[in-house]
Image (cartoon, rainbow, N blue to C red):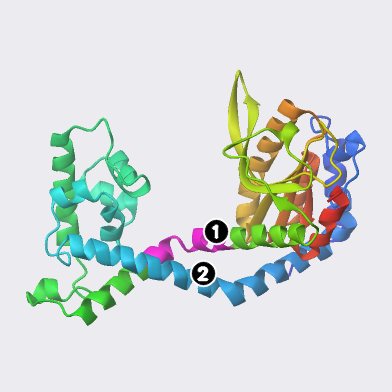
Amino acid sequence: MIGFTDNDLQRQLDRYRQNDDLTPLFMHGAMMINANKPDLWKADIAQSVDYYNDWFLRFAPQAFRETRIETTERVLATFRQTRNLADINPDILRANPAAVETLRMTTAPPLARDRLVGLAGISTNLVKSAELRQRVPYKMSEQQLRSEFERMSDVFRKLADVDILPWLSSGNEPTEAEIYRAASIVADRLCGAVANPIIRNAQERRQLSAIKNWLDDRGYRVFDSGQQLSLDAFPPGRYGFRLNAAVEHGTRHVNVPIDAVVMPHHGLQGELPVLIEAKSAGDFTNTNKRRKEEATKNAQLRLTYGDTVRYILFLCGYFDSGYLGYEAAEGIDWVWEHRIDDLSQLGL
């Protein structure tokens, strides 16, 4: 049950409006879609939660299975490189740093990244670089690399999970069935550790697809501007996904990613396109941790391009009144995916 009332929502928005440090968009006289309608928030939150849960039950298992298949192939590659884990040594890890993440999941118990660092007495930077960037740190000497990879290899050998890798204790050659079974278990462990990002990425792709279909039905065409986006030169009737916009950041300019950029069919010269940020959430907790990201991006865009910037959130899932009130106070409006036709209120 969602634990708030319409009066709670109205009181919360009133508090934001009375805060002199904040300048909500509706104070600039702009037409709002949802940010200034707290009487609709409760029902929309409930519908959004139902919409997300319905998608999750129907499509999340498929997204997880597809990732699991890809991950199993990656695990099998590590098995081949290490002769089915019978030969884990510094040379192999030096040549294949990405194998470290897989090998952490072949132990009993599976090792968290920090646990491996502590047990092996090695550099956190080495493990992160190997797993996240698939390379070794540039400034680490070959002598140190070899020493730390040796200690890492020793941990993997000592803690090998012989229940899923029985050939390591029996000395027998593993069968193809045993190898694939073990690789599947390791892949499950890897996918379990990153289940939330897998689902989040699948949901983001689905959200952008929904926006694309909605725009295509109304005669919009894709425009690829490359990596750098000039907001004041975007052609009418075009849209693009995952583009970068240059914004002011102190004394320099930096690029910020924009999920979707759309210029209305009747956009005038010098008019800025609509900027859409696709956001989804499978629980109420993480949304309030991430809400400052949108506020920061919105502030950077306004500082660079002025108050006419139209930066809109496209929401699906668990976004509660605390999140909505915060974004409204920061001058950010939103469109719910379950009411995607509200995009037309942006002149699209």
> In the figure, residue 296 lies in which quadrant?
top right
1 sits to left or right of 157: right
**x then y, percent, for residue 74:** 32, 63
Quarter of the image for residue 303 reads top right
The disc at residue 63 is 2
User: Which quadrant is home to the N terminus?
Assistant: bottom right
Residue that lies at the very extreme toward the top in this rendered image: 251
Could you tell me residue 336's position as x and y percent?
A: 77, 59
Q: Is residue 164 above or below residue 314?
A: below
Q: Nearer the viewer, residue 250 or 276?
A: 276
What predominant SS class does the magenta segment belong to? Answer: helix
Task: Place residue 304 in its image quadrant.
Answer: top right
At horizontal 33% and vertical 42% (from top left) the residue drawn is 129
Q: Which portion, as a residue range, is magenta?
A: 189-202
Residue 319 in view, yes or no: no
Which residue is the site of mark 1? Answer: 201
Q: Give the SS element for disc 1.
A: helix
Q: Nearer the viewer, residue 20 or 225?
A: 225
Residue 206 in sight in this render:
yes
Q: Residue at x 55, y 71 (%)?
A: 60
* Residue 46 as seen in the image, left or right of residue 259: right
Which amino acid lies under the numbered mark 1 shown in the image of this protein? Asn
Counting residues from the N terminus, which is met first, the one under dot 2 or under dot 1? 2
Between residues 89 and 224, which one lies in front from this camera angle? 224
Residue at the (26%, 63%) spot, across then down: 77
Do residues under tags 2 and 1 come within 8 Å of each other at their CB atoms?
A: yes
Horizontally, is 159 left or right of 240 in the view? left
- The reply to whether the magenta stretch includes residue 195 is yes
